[in-house]
Image (spheres, rainbow, N blue to C red):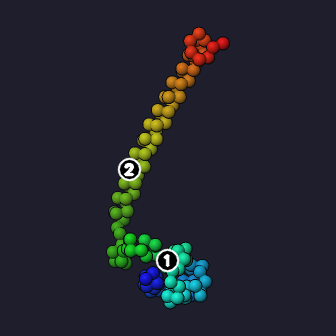
Amino acid sequence: MIRVQLREMKEKSGLSNKELAERSGISLPTVNRIMSGQTDIPNYQTVCDLVMAMGGSMDELAGIQRKPAPGQETSAEGYMAVIQDKNRIIGEKDRWIKRLFVISLALLALLLGILIYDYLHPMIGFIRT
């Protein structure tokens, strides 16, 4: 099953078994065994290396996400919309981080004020001399 998908990816990439072995860093006999179906269940890392060498993704291999056809490439506007959305999310998180920082500074100042007051008034509080 995975052999068929790997062969399809290999045909789309136009690579020979030797080129695939060189690009992926996997030995040629191993590539030959996988592509011919002699290996029933290839190692995950080996499959991942082969897919990356062919310019694909594991999602594409699993059928989760397909690469767009050459004439159907996603537009720059789509990417810009995603980038703007991510920037908006980052901006919101930055605002929350600033708020938490200000709150922590206020709590620290309050605690420091209490300690100073306690130290200056030895008859009341925890610090007694």
**Image height of 71 relative to 11, above or below:** above
Does dot 1 land on a helix, a strand or a loop?
A: helix
Q: Quadrant of the N terminus?
A: bottom left
Farthest top residue in view: 123
Asked whether 52 or 90 is in front, the reply is: 52
Residue to which mark 2 is pinned: 88
Q: Position of residue 96 (x, y in %)?
A: 43, 41
Q: Earlier in the sequence, mark 2 or mark 1?
A: 1
Q: Residue at x 66, y 12 (%)?
A: 129
What is the three-letter code of the residue carrying label 2? Answer: Arg
Does dot 2 land on a helix, a strand or a loop?
A: helix
Q: Residue at x 44, y 44 (%)?
A: 94
Residue to which mark 1 is pinned: 51
Determine if residue 90 is in view.
Answer: yes
**Image height of 98 relative to 81, above or below:** above
Q: Position of residue 74 (x, y in %)?
A: 35, 69
Question: Which dot marks residue 63?
Answer: none
- Given contact means CB atoms under 8 Å apart, are the residues at marks 2 and 1 in contact? no
Farthest front residue in view: 40
Q: What is the CA distance from the residue labelled 2 to the residue labelled 1?
A: 34 Å
Q: Residue at x 59, y 87 (%)?
A: 29
Q: Quadrant of residue 127?
A: top right
Q: Is residue 95 left or right of residue 29?
A: left
What is the three-letter code of the residue carrying label 1? Answer: Val
Q: Position of residue 104 (x, y in %)?
A: 50, 33
Q: Position of residue 128 (x, y in %)?
A: 63, 14
The total number of labels drawn is: 2
Asked whether 13 or 116 is in front, the reply is: 116
Determine if residue 9 is in view.
Answer: no
For the residue carrying disc 2, how many other residues have a C-alpha within 10 Å: few (<14), some (14-19), or many (20+)?
few
